[in-house]
Image: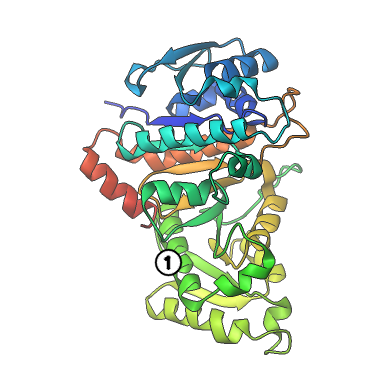
Amino acid sequence: MEPRKPLLAITQGDPAGVGPETVVGAWRQPEMHDLCRVVAIGHPIVFQRAVELVHAGATIVTVESPDEIDSSPSVIPCLSSGSDDAADVLPATIDPRGGQAAYDALVVAAHLALDGKVSGLVTAPLHKAALWRAGHHFPGHTELLAQLCGVDDFAMMLYLGPTAMSIDGSRCVRGSAGLGVVHVTLHMGLAEVFRHLTTESILAKIHLADQVMGKIKGEKPRIGVCALNPHAGEEGLFGNEEIRTIAPAVEAAQHAGLLAVGPFPTDTLMVRARNGEFDAVVAMYHDQGHIALKLLGMHQAVNVTCGLPIVRTSVAHGTAFDLAWQGRAETSGMIEAVRMAAKLSKSISGISDKQEKMLLRDRLGC
């Protein structure tokens, strides 16, 4: 008997951005429903507007519980969250009501996952300034989810699968397991990065990279660790963080049996990783990892939160106010995020909640 497809919750994100239309645009693709069963979390009116915008030809059906879902390309079951204020948010505006709507949808989806009612969640983008104006002072989804799940050891990983293709028809990355980039520091000013980089924090992220990519690859992954300074500090001429902070973390990881090497200059390390020499890269700060991976495959990259007791993936782009509510939003990233969440979730379908949580914790490295 074929195992039942995993049930995923997809949040609307900020209603002022491209989130609702990327959800609806992906929803009408049969591929999405081949991968999983889906329930949308957000305001039904917002999703209905997105349906009309992209001419999806789908019907929004409000449900009270994920147990009621019957999703298909033509039926979008929506579990309503938040207040009706979400329907009044104007496109491409930083509005606290939009931040609150994104927050409300995320909280509902996270609790569904924590309670074992869905196998995982996929999030559409929120706007960080709108989130703050709504009174929720988190740098983004990753940190908010970590608090909701009660974990301290977590990380963002951007991931490109082995089948991701560039516009010229070549593979984005050549490793058999794809490429994951885990970030030691994330949403903070560059001036703050130096204060938060410690041997302990770098080692923790190397372990998360090993655990998550190990589950994807099926064996120990090869991990390249980025330097912080140009030329990896040039033996201390351009900074000594490599000598004092990063190298000791790599050595500790090696002593623990991990296949970690570095620190290497990022400009050459990412080329080596793209060519298949590494399965994972540990970046020291946000743009060090994001820019390189998004250049390789912007709309096929997936954001995976490592260290949570639940599966969470997301598109790798933001609210894109310059494109919002024009019917021009790219939907391939949402399909890839769903694909990754389904891949992480499907093997646990049909087992007990206790077993499920134990497997999820093992799978996502917490």
Q: Position of residue 72 (x, y in %)?
A: 48, 16
Q: Position of residue 306 (x, y in %)?
A: 45, 54
Q: Secondary structure at mark 1?
A: helix
Examine the image and state in which quarter residue 93 appears: top right
Q: Is residue 324 left or right of residue 66?
A: right
The quadrant in which the C terminus is found is bottom left
Q: Which residue is at 21% across, 43% downward?
A: 354
Q: Position of residue 198 (x, y in %)?
A: 52, 76
Residue toward you, 258 or 49: 49
Does 60 appear above or below 270? above
Residue toward you, 362 or 80: 80
Does 363 appear above or below 24? below
The quadrant in which the N terminus is found is top left
Does 163 appear above or below 276? above
Q: Is residue 278 visible?
A: no
Looking at numbered disc 1 in the image, what kind of residue is underneath it? His
